[in-house]
Image (cartoon, helix red, strand yellow):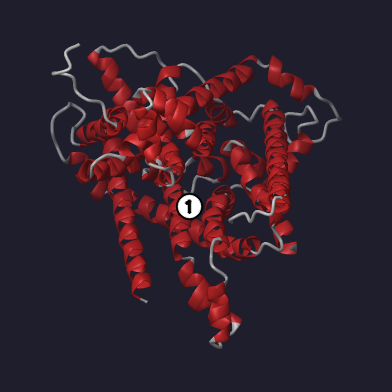
């Protein structure tokens, strides 16, 4: 137990140092009196608030797109015939396994070629959303697949037999069955986009994300506002995940109690 | 309705948009990359970029340094993560998986911010920029990617194998080497894939924590693109792609081999 807590504290030590120093307004890491100034700066500092906004817009839209396309693709690929199925799966693995810098530069060359051909592609938002979506789709497929394997194959046909079209069957019958996989996929896609630096660096066009802004400002000494920003992110993530986990484990417990009181034995 | 000419929609057709996406955004970019790598700066076909790279000592030095760093990173991650994963897989310490969650949370914080925090901490501790700091940074950033697959496989392991081992007279050391370690092999493989591969191309950590001594593959590609030497950069990227492909091939072979051995015994 001591080992576990020791490693957790080592893991969190840098973040805690950051947290402490986000309450002091000095440029370097020197204590310079307590203040909330840096936290205020997150909202007033034009460049940073812009980057935060861009990052969130790109992460949300690419995660939603990737989840949507990913679910349909997972279902489609699941029912593909062997040779095409294998090829598609192998191709989708390329972006998963490839080094980020390769993916980034390959996208840059592609977008450049596209604009050379004369197809207009708005810089920044469009390129980053496309790139992040493409990178995230395989992860969504991976997240949905286990659920899909356990899905009753007759459900889909039942939907069709009852007169729903393919699209309607997907949305009203299949989506609810795959929802946990979709949520996981969305979370992964969102995280990938937030975390990404190299793809953004090469395809950002005229806009900045948090990562690229941090990277470009490191050379001239990182703006102290980033300390506050990272602390806010840290505390938010910590709180959200712990609450979620608390709720879900409480739910599990109450479900177990319910099941026991009904005299049912829960599998697993 | 011209039902005669109607193409019936089937479920598998849902995959067609993605197949198109794959072709346009995965296959075509790689072909463009290959095209750039096989052109000189005037746009003529040539192998010069590859020849130049393979004749230059810098390439091999960079390659060696990158491999060594990636190897050390993965190795240290395994050494640290394996015992921890074993502890976490023991439900006694890890009720309702909250503790595991605590290990994943830092992954949600932008890795540049994490690395920056680490730099501040290291400078407080009196560790300046250099190889050791870069190594610490790599391990710090990639550690969860080693821990999670190991934890997943160890917590899913059937404990009765260990009991069987004990019944057959193995002590705990023998049990570990003959039962736990072989059974966790797939977790080790995916952990290595998830730490070694990113470690090959990460250059931001070296920029933030390293001194000028260490020059990595990622730095080299990045600098070449920065200098607008796109053809050379693409050639270097192609070499890296081949290398990554080779590793994937070896790993998938060894996975199959281990599955085969597991099936046979």
Return the residue nearer the eye: A157 or A45. Answer: A157
Query: In the image, is B31 to the left or to the right of B117?
Result: left
Residue B165's place in the image compared with B243, above or below, is below
Q: Is residue B75 left or right of residue A162?
A: right
Viewer-nearest residue: B103 or B65: B103
Quick one: SS at disc 1? helix
Q: Position of residue A249 (x, y in %)?
A: 70, 46
**Residue B233: where, in percent of width, then height?**
31, 36
Residue lying farthest to the right in this orientation: A33
Other residues around mark 1 within 10 Å, as few (<14) / some (14–19) / many (≥20): many
Q: Quadrant of the C terminus of chain B?
A: bottom left
The residue sitting at the bottom extreme is: B169
Which residue is painted at 57% across and 47% down in the image?
A: B141
Q: Which residue lies at the image location 18% right of the left edge and 19% below the top edge?
A: B6
Q: In the rendered image, is residue B109 in sight? A: yes
Q: Is residue B221 visible?
A: no
> In the visual, does A189 lie left or right of B108?
left
What residue is drawn where x is 29% and y is 56%? B249
Relative to A127, B23 lies left or right: left
Quarter location, residue A111: top left
Dividing the image into 4 quarters, which one contains the N terminus of chain B?
top left
In depth, the one of A153 and B203 nearer the eye is: A153
Instruction: Name the residue tied to disc 1.
Output: B195
Q: State the residue at coordinates (72%, 35%).
A: A235
B65 vs A118: above or below: below
Identify the subunit bearing mark 1: B
Q: Position of residue B46 (x, y in %)?
A: 14, 37
């Amino acid at each position: 137990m001591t080992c576990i807590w020791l490693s957790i504290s080592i893991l969190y030590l840098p973040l805690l140092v950051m947290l402490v120093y986000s309450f002091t307004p000095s440029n370097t890491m020197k204590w310079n009196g307590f203040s909330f100034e840096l936290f205020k700066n997150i909202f007033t500092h034009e460049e940073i608030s812009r980057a935060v906004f861009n990052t969130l817009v790109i992460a949300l839209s690419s995660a939603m797109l990737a989840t949507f396309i990913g679910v349909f693709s997972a279902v489609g690929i699941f029912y593909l015939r062997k040779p095409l199925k294998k090829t598609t799966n192998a191709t989708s693995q390329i972006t998963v396994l490839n080094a980020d810098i390769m993916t980034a530069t390959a996208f840059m060359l592609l977008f450049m070629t596209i604009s050379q051909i004369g197809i207009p592609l708005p810089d920044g938002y469009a390129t980053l959303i496309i790139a992040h979506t493409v990178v995230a789709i395989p992860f969504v497929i991976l997240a949905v697949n286990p659920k899909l394997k356990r899905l009753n194959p007759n459900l889909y046909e039942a939907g069709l037999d009852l007169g729903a079209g393919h699209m309607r069957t997907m949305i009203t019958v299949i989506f609810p069955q795959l929802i946990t996989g979709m949520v996981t996929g969305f979370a992964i896609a969102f995280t990938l986009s937030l975390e990404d630096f190299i793809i953004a660096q090469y395809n950002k066009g005229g806009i900045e994300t948090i990562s690229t802004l941090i990277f470009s400002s490191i050379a001239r000494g990182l703006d102290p506002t980033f300390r506050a920003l990272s602390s806010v992110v840290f505390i938010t993530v910590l709180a959200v995940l712990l609450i979620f986990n608390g709720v879900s484990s409480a739910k599990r417990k109450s479900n177990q109690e319910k099941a026991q009181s009904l005299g049912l034995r829960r599998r697993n | 309705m011209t039902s005669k000419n109607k193409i019936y929609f089937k479920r598998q057709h849902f995959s067609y948009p993605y197949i198109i996406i794959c072709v346009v955004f995965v296959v075509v970019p790689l072909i463009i990359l290959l095209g750039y790598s096989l052109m000189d700066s005037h746009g003529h076909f040539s192998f010069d970029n590859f020849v130049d790279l393979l004749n230059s000592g810098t390439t091999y030095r960079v390659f060696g340094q990158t491999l060594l760093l990636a190897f050390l990173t993965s190795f240290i991650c395994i050494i640290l993560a394996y015992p921890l994963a074993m502890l976490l897989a023991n439900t006694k310490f890890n009720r309702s998986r909250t503790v595991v969650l605590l290990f994943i949370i830092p992954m949600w914080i932008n890795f540049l911010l994490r690395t920056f925090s680490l730099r501040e901490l290291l400078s407080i501790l009196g560790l300046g920029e250099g190889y050791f700091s870069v190594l610490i940074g790599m391990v710090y950033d990639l550690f969860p990617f080693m821990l999670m697959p190991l934890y997943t496989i160890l917590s899913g392991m059937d404990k009765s194998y260990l009991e069987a081992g004990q019944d057959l007279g193995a002590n705990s050391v023998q049990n570990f080497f003959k039962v736990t370690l072989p059974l966790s092999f797939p977790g080790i493989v995916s952990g290595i894939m998830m730490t070694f591969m990113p470690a090959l191309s990460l250059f931001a950590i070296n920029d933030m924590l390293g001194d000028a001594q260490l020059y990595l593959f990622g730095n080299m590609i990045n600098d070449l693109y920065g200098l607008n030497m796109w053809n050379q950069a693409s050639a270097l990227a192609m070499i890296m792609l081949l290398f990554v492909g080779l590793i994937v091939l070896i790993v998938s072979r060894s996975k199959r081999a281990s599955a085969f051995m597991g099936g046979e015994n």
